[in-house]
Amino acid sequence: MIKAALSGGLGNQMFQYAFARNLSIKNNAKLYLNTSYLQSKLPIKSLATSMQYELDIFNIQAEISQNIFQSKFLYPLAKAEYLLRDTWNKNQWNVLQETSFNFQPEYLSAKDNTYIKGNFQSEKYFIEIEKIIRQEFQFKPTLKEENLVWKQQIENSNAVSIHVRRGDYISLKQNVHKFAQIPIVYFQKAINHIASKIENPVFFVFSDDIDWVKRELKTEFPVHFISNNNTKQTSYIDMQLMSLCKHNIICNSTFSWWGAWLNSHPDKMVIAPQQWFADNSINSKDIYPLKWIKL
């Protein structure tokens, strides 16, 4: 059995699942997802980004474990349960703890009965099962109403998605110090680059701060601002719509990354920011697929 500890938001959980799924296939082993950490986080928005299990929108192949104590009012018990589960897992399993952000090829040699903890943010951890991951990361919910209209507009144009993440990247101190603050000039340069390569681009903007983007982003090309999915229950739809675009301009976000990676157009252009982390000493080269353009 391969067991993966899930943490973070949807994009992080997708990376963790994809790597764990690859290991489970290599070892012909059952895959088990431990969600207890997600339910152990203190539910105070000013201290941490709210997290929950989010992979149920996909056709994943794994068994899920959840805390006995799931109510936010039982946080101390949920925290204690997570610590007990984590300690038990470390004592009972071979532990693979990610120690570097860079791709570690030896991780792919992990054997059965391994408990994995980390982010594993590189397609190199699962590229050999790309077809399986794309199939299992097909969105189960169908688009309705306003999002169905967006889908039709995207499919009927030379659509380019732009994803701008602000939210917890600027409101939480730990994120301000962790992630690079991507300036609006990056998006302007990315727009100009794509416009120089394709005809009649139409840009579809997704953001958790759409009003800020409307004020700051200046372009002569047609732009649509999509703001109807900014709730915890519906935010995944932005990723779904981004994946339908022919090209993608992403920010330094795993949510943004997956929106572009799931884009199945063979001639797609993906533009990503040169700097991912606030700390320039962190080598983030392995997060970028080879054909993606860094500006």
Image: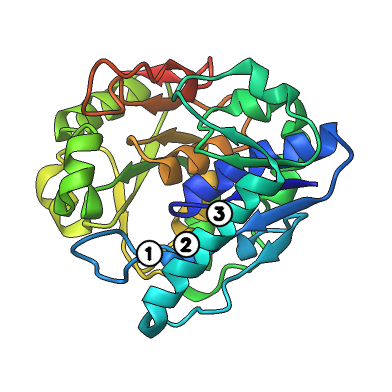
SS type, badge 1: loop
Q: Are marks 2 and 1 in contact (CB under 8 Å)?
A: yes
| Number of numbered tags placed on the structure image | 3
SS type, badge 3: helix
SS type, badge 2: helix
Q: Which residue is mark 1?
A: 41
Q: Which mark is residue 55?
A: none
Q: Are marks 3 and 1 in contact (CB under 8 Å)?
A: no
Q: Is 65 on the left or on the right of 251, as rendered?
A: right
Label 2 Cα neighbours within 10 Å, binned few <14 / some 14-19 / many ≥20: many
Q: Is residue 233 visible?
A: no
**Which residue is nearer to you in this view: 74 or 152?**
74
Q: Which residue is mark 2?
A: 38
Q: How is the image coloured?
A: rainbow
Q: Residue at x 48, y 52 (%)?
A: 7
* Amino acid type of the residue that numbered disc 1 sits on in the rendered structure: Lys
Q: Position of residue 40 (x, y in %)?
A: 43, 66
* Amino acid type of the residue that numbered disc 2 sits on in the rendered structure: Leu
Q: Is 126 on the left or on the right of 121, as rendered?
A: right
Q: Residue at x 66, y 55 (%)?
A: 33
Q: Position of residue 143 (x, y in %)?
A: 57, 68
Q: Residue furthest front?
A: 91
Nearest to viewer (mark 2 / mark 3): 3
Q: Which residue is mark 3?
A: 86
Work out whether mark 2 precedes mark 3 in sequence or the reverse, and give the earlier one.
2
Label 1 Cα neighbours within 10 Å, binned few <14 / some 14-19 / many ≥20: many
Q: Is residue 91 visible?
A: yes
Give residue 104's quadrant in the image. top right
**Which residue is nearer to you in this view: 81 or 173?**
81
* Amino acid type of the residue that numbered disc 3 sits on in the rendered structure: Asp
Work out whether mark 3 precedes mark 1 in sequence or the reverse, and give the earlier one.
1
